[in-house]
Image (spheres, rainbow, N blue to C red):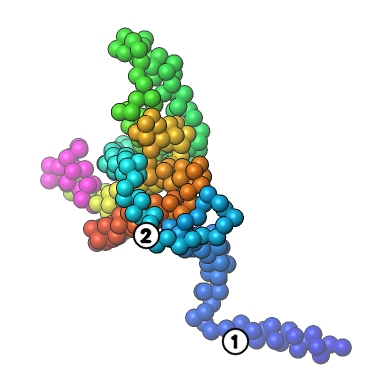
Amino acid sequence: MTTAPRRNLYRLERLPAQVPQAAVPYLFLLPALVALTISVFWPALRAFYLSFTSFGLDLTAPPTWVGLANLKRLMADEVFWQTVRNSLVYLMGVVPVLTFAPLGLAILVNRQLRGIHWLRVAYYSPVVVSMVVAGIAWRWLYAENGLFNQLLQATGLFPQGIPWLTSPSLALWSVMLVTIWKGMGYYMVIYLAGLQSIPQDLYEAAAIDGSDGWRRHWDITLPLMRPYLWLVAIISAIAATKVFEEVYIMTQGGPRNSSKTVVYYIYEQAFEKLEISYACAIGLVLFLAIVALSALRLTLGNQDVTPLG
């Protein structure tokens, strides 16, 4: 009666020994790889295939192979090129600020002062706020009778207020300000980790040599923080090319496409106009741009990305 259970138990004990040692890590990774394949890799391959087909208006019909027709259409699409220009403006406007301003904040809060932890929390708090909530709140602040215009009208500087989100020349910059406000605390924490890894002996030695105050940050902090500067610059650049929530909540690409970005244009083509294949072609171009930014980061900052230790 007990022979069979003991034999099965012996087999279970022998089973791990039959698995090659090199395959054990991959067995642990298998569930995550399956989930990524279903949710990321397969949709990405499917989108790549659809970018060379005609599919969307009739979702019940199978995709029809059209080759490079979608890419040719893309090259002649004026709205697409306008979204590219808007995305580049967004990139050039947001990345420099989010690269250097958080470093100043990190230097400010990297001090042993009473209540400094509360100051760090205050600067980081916008990061934990949902972009949906932040976008709605800032849209109210930017409104014609919002807080900003009421303050400007009270001072008499702009009696009519400022059309923050309704002016083609201001809408994109107004949305960019929300992105900067939302991201400052996140990158500040990255810089704060780098600052706390710099030995204090270097600052003491610099003070003996006459480098004190803000001069020591120019001589010591900036050179040693170069790996983190590269990291933040590339991360913020990739995030700026994929901006969507702010635009969708605050302007929906208007007025006159002045704040429409590439990602929002993908959403508009795919879910509003049901041009699935065309949206996939735009996504393919965006993917290549992000790959180029990642390659630039590896090429220019490969020797500088090792954290201080």
Residue 95 vertical position relative to residue 166 in the rendered view, above or below: below
63 and 289: which one is in front? 63
131 and 1: which one is in front? 131
**In this picture, which residue range is highlighted in magenta?**
207-224
- What residue is pinned by disc 2? 68
Decide if residue 97 is on the left or right side of residue 150: left
Q: Secondary structure at mark 1?
A: helix
Q: Position of residue 92 (x, y in %)?
A: 27, 41
Residue at x 49% of width, y 61% of height:
64
> Disc 2 versus disc 1: distance between alpha carbons?
50 Å
Residue at x 17% of width, y 40% of height:
215
Residue at x 51% of width, y 47% of height:
274
Q: Position of residue 111 (x, y in %)?
A: 33, 39
Q: Position of residue 12 (x, y in %)?
A: 69, 83
Image quadrant where residue 125 sits: top left
Q: Secondary structure at mark 2?
A: loop
